[in-house]
Amino acid sequence: MKSKLAILLALVAGAAAAPVYAQTSPDADFAARCSAPGVVKCFGFDNTTTDIVRGTNTFPDGSGVFRAGLDTATKASGGGSLRFDLPPPPQAGANLAGSWVPVGGWGRTFSQNSTFYVQYRMRLSSYMVQPGSWDGMIYKTSIFHSGGKTCASIELTTSGYYGSPMAQLDTDCGGRFMWSTLDGTQYTNAPPLLMQQTDNLKCVYGTDYAANCVNFVADEWMTLYYRVQIGTWDQPNSQIDAWVGRDGQPLRQYVKMRNFLLSCNGSCTTSPDKDDGYNNVTLTPYMTHLPTTAGPSTAAHMWFDEFIVSSQPIALPGNVVRPDPPTNVTAN
């Protein structure tokens, strides 16, 4: 029989070692995640017959030019990915590259007293993460919303913070960002505040965001993962979590909001509607107030792939490391 010391040493060695997972192809890996219990909808962005169709689920920029399409060369899995081409100036301004919105949305509405999970892969070219590339504009990436309302109370928007690569999340059409008190216990918009609720960084307002915050990176597929637990509309009892993971590295949490108020367009306190809730997504690099003459002199790009919505936790892609094992293991 092994001694307690031998057992403890084995546990510590196991905790320190890199996790090992069964090897599988990217296509099989995505298919397995899509067929898991609780999955509501999957989008693979593999073709132009159903996945990426102009005028049906893919829409033009502010000048009527289609700048989103299928990329068969740069992809996380399957036959391709959704790519947005952001042209150099002059361009269409705020809506400079169009959008993608699924027909029929998610097919399910998540309202009060429910929880949903979203996971997708995203890739950015270098100009998307270079500070100052877009004259300090916030560039959006994804918007979770209700029906066709992308600028409303029922809305969670992921973006890069004012011309920087710092990942952020907001609601109420940009009216409230996921900022918290320094102890992370509740929402605030009055400094001093945490711009992110990370596990091991201090992303405090006014500090060095590049060093102290979780940032998007260029030229590699990132995994974005969300957990949204909706409490009671217009009451501070919801929870929101968001992570970013680089290939071969653990997920890094940048949103951990507790006691957060999620609103329902001001109507749910008196007459809750079963159709009020999150049931759709818009993918777009939209930049509010972007001048038509602003931006880098070379085209930039934003890619999406492997979008999953579920009522249960979603397994991570095979090339994303799970969070580190617990370190407080003891042997009796």
Image (tube, rainbow, N blue to C red):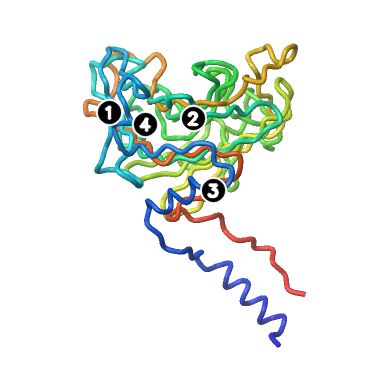
Residue at label 1?
Answer: 85
- First in sequence, mark 1 or 4: give its number: 1
- Which one is nearer the viewer's eye here, 265 or 28? 28
- First in sequence, mark 4 or 2: give its number: 4
Residue at label 3?
Answer: 36
The residues tagged by marks 3 and 1 sit, at their Cα atoms, a distance apart of 33 Å
Give the image location of residue 239, x and y in percent: 67, 34
Using a 10 Å C-alpha cutoff, classify the residue at mark 2 as few (fewer than 14 neighbours), some (14 to 19) or many (20 or more).
many
Question: Extreme front residue here?
Answer: 49
Badge 4 element:
loop
Give the image location of residue 118, x and y in percent: 53, 38
Residue 265 tag number: none
Question: Extreme bottom residue here?
Answer: 1
Residue at label 4?
Answer: 131
Please name the amino acid that badge 1 sits on: Asp
Residue at label 2?
Answer: 158
The residues tagged by marks 3 and 4 sit, at their Cα atoms, a distance apart of 39 Å
* Circles 2 and 1 in contact, beta carbons < 8 Å: no
Give the image location of residue 133, x and y in percent: 32, 27
The residues tagged by marks 2 and 3 sit, at their Cα atoms, a distance apart of 25 Å
The residues tagged by marks 1 and 4 sit, at their Cα atoms, a distance apart of 19 Å
Residue at 34 percent across and 31 percent down: it is 50
Using a 10 Å C-alpha cutoff, classify the residue at mark 1 as few (fewer than 14 neighbours), some (14 to 19) or many (20 or more).
some
* Circles 1 and 4 in contact, beta carbons < 8 Å: no
Please name the amino acid that badge 2 sits on: Thr
